[in-house]
Amino acid sequence: MPIPSVLLFVLLAGLIAYTYVGYGFVIYGLVKLRRLLGYTNQLDLPSLPTLDVTLIIPAYNEIDYLPAKLQNCLAQNYPAQHVRLLFVVEGSTDGSAEYLETMKAQVPNLTVVSGTRRLGKIEAMNNAMPLVQTPIALFTDANTLLNPEAVSRIMHRFANASVGAVTGEKRISTEATEAASGSGEGLYWRYESLLKRLDAELHTIVGAAGELFAIRTALYEPVEADTLLDDFMISLRIAGRGYRVDYAPDAYAMERPSHSIREEKKRKVRIAAGGFQSMGRLLPLLNPFRYGWLSFQYISHRVLRWAVAPFCLPLLLLLNALIVSDLSAGSAQWLFWCIMLAGQALFYTMAGVGYYLENRQTRWKATFVPYYFVFMNWCVMLGLVRFWNGGLSGIWEKAVRAA
């Protein structure tokens, strides 16, 4: 019996299982224990102060979305006299600035920052923040629509003085006949939303959704211009300063899935590269003796998923094959490990079928999970290559969304 190979297989399999499934069970158990002991992060605040808030919308060549986005912002049920709108459209060449300027007469609380040079979302945010004079700054993307209660529900969370940032929920709007890429993306975000609910109740979430998140204006620190995941960096740095990043699942931003798997791949690879960039800049958060629960959540929910588990998957398959080759054919142990190998092979075969059907209108949902799981991890590996090659830019190459 190849003992070292078996032990390594069990170790890698356990690490993979913990990363993708086990952490959810562990954090659920910890949250239940906190409830039994009477600990909670939710405060009973029947009387809340009404804080002023600035909605910041970076928008590069988003004229197709701007009318709906502007109306969506104006339709929020938060008191209008306490809301400011700040659109940052620097570098746009599609008439975005001109349209918004014409709307100023109808929307007196509207400010437009424009210019001829495209600086990228990070620089746009850095330039916008000095203009914010409200205690709360709320960021939202131009191509997403918020539920009418989104702003009020996020602002409610800031009544807790320990909260430095609040993120809403990203929801993917998919059709019944959506391509596998869109359906897989929707499943992924529903699972992520569940983990965020548990993370927030335990201590803090580890990473905001760029489509909808808010911070205390005084806590904002300018982000490096080449940053790929600005929302992640901003929220984790606030958490590192001792504040909680809360989660408001009843405040959500609706977004269509990527138009195709090619577009989704482009987005995922960039996010993965940004993950490696962020981990390099957030090294102190790996110290649990200093950051406690934050380190535990950050390592379990992000670091393992980005930097460890994806690279364990091919090793697990290779180890399984080596174990089978080292055993005597026909033995009980050989049969067990053959079944394990066949199970892995079946999973990847289903992922391959999902790849083949990627943009066909199919209802065979059995392939969604294996396909999207393999796809995400492959994008992480490509993201590492992109990060390693350098030359990263904070200017997004927008992914085309489904109509």
Image (cartoon, rainbow, N blue to C red):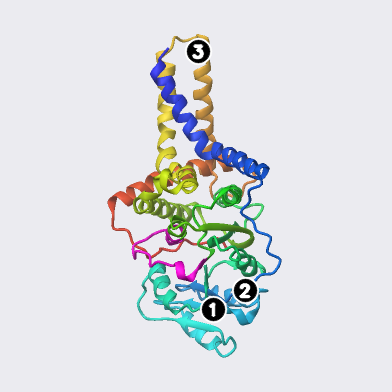
Q: Nearer the viewer, residue 28 or 293?
A: 293
278 horizontally vs 25: left or right: left
- In terms of sequence position, does the residue under pointer 3 or pointer 1 come before the other? 1
* Residue pointed to by mark 2: 72
Give the percent coordinates (x, y) of residue 114: 42, 81
Q: Quadrant of residue 144?
A: bottom right
Residue 258 visible, this orientation: no
Q: Residue at x 55, y 45 (%)?
A: 357
Looking at the rendered structure, which numbered label has been put on residue 174? none
* Secondary structure of residue under mark 1: strand
Q: Nearer the viewer, residue 255 or 129?
A: 129
Magenta span of residues = 215-234
* Residue type beneath disc 2: Asn
Looking at the rendered structure, which numbered label has been put on residue 85? 1
Q: Quarter holding the C terminus?
A: bottom right
- In terms of sequence position, does the residue under pointer 1 or pointer 2 come before the other? 2
- In terms of sequence position, does the residue under pointer 2 or pointer 3 come before the other? 2
Residue 200 visible, this orientation: yes
User: Marks 1/2: CA distance?
Assistant: 11 Å
In the image, which is nearer the foreground, mark 3 or mark 1?
A: 1
Give the percent coordinates (x, y) of residue 99: 51, 84
Give the percent coordinates (x, y) of residue 398: 44, 63
Q: Quadrant of residue 75?
A: bottom right
User: Marks 3/1: CA distance?
Assistant: 66 Å
* Residue pointed to by mark 3: 333
Up-down: is 261 above or below 119? above
Do the CB atoms of the residues marked 2 and 3 lie less than 8 Å apart?
no
Q: Residues within 10 Å of mark 1 (few under 14, many from 20)?
A: many
In magenta stretch: residue 117: no
* Residue type beneath disc 1: Leu
